Image: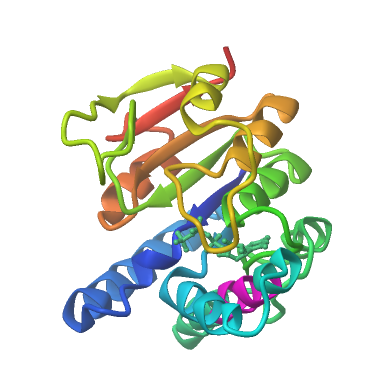
Amino acid sequence: MTTHIVALGGSLLRPEEAEQRSQWFGQLRQLAVHLEGNGRKLGIVVGGGLPAREGITLARASTSDSYRLDTVGIAATRLNATILQQSLLDIGCNVCPIIPNSTEEATDLLDAHNFVIMGGTTPGHTTDAVAVALARDCGAPHCIIATNVSHVHDSDPRTDSSAKAIEELTLNQLAEITGTEPLEPGESAAVDPVAVKWAIEASMRLAVLDGRDLSILEDAIEGRPFVGTLIKVE
Ligand code: UTP
């Protein structure tokens, strides 16, 4: 049975929008029940979202050491992973009760569980890169990056209103857009450059899609055409 790996952006937990948040969690629980019913296995790597940004901002008052700030960010990702883990345990899904500390540990835990949910691992990258490493380690066919934008764009749509959505590109073309320099602690980008580098090294196909609409995530998991950006090896 194929294992699927999803990087779930922390912004999708929507700390700022109570009503949409509870709808989204309800849909996610439904999707989990459906996937488990079909015998699917899923590794979910959850981002830190608002608590990561807030925690890193608080910590910056007393340190500018990137390793320490990343450690704060990782704690936030593990908090968000725990929220998701407890939500799915609550409805009786076969979710691993441990939040693994490494992708190797997560790969082992996927043997006995339909869902393994984790956050970050070590400083120097974001949860996008952790998801790529987990996909590589457990032999997944691709890594899905569910975020809060519809596609990868040819420039940053937050600052450039003429940015164009891209439906398909290669990993090397993606690397030209993201660059190859690691991000600063708490800095966000469409896809983490370290994740792109690791995907190139592992010849790992990526799918970037809008995780606010969980039907799109389901399409990608089920191997159907999906709305978003498909990133081919070459
Ligand atoms: P995220 O993975 O949440 O960053 O990690 P993001 O891509 O901005 O994701 P969203 O906004 O949740 O979608 C948050 C911070 O935690 C540290 C980094 O400082 C990162 O910026 N981090 C995370 C690590 O150092 N290592 C990890 O494995 C994961």
Single out the residue that lies furthest toward the top: 234
Q: Measured from the top left, where is residue 212 in percent x and y? A: 28, 58
Q: Which residue lies at the image location 27% right of the left edge and 35% below the top edge?
A: 227
Of residues 42 and 185, which is closer to you in this image?
185
Q: Which residue lies at the image location 34% right of the left edge and 41% below the top edge?
A: 219
Q: Measured from the top left, where is residue 117 in percent x and y? A: 61, 68
Q: Is residue 74 magenta?
A: yes
Magenta stretch, main secondary structure class: helix
Q: Measured from the top left, where is residue 231 in percent x and y? A: 48, 25
Of residues 10 and 58, which is closer to you in this image?
58
Question: Which quarter of the rendered picture does the N terminus lie within?
Answer: top right
Of residues 167 and 172, which is closer to you in this image?
172
134 lies above or below 47: above
Does residue 108 show up? Answer: yes
Q: Quadrant of ligand 1?
A: bottom right
Q: Is residue 48 magenta?
A: no
The span shown in magenta is 71-79
**Quadrant of residue 223 in the image?**
top left
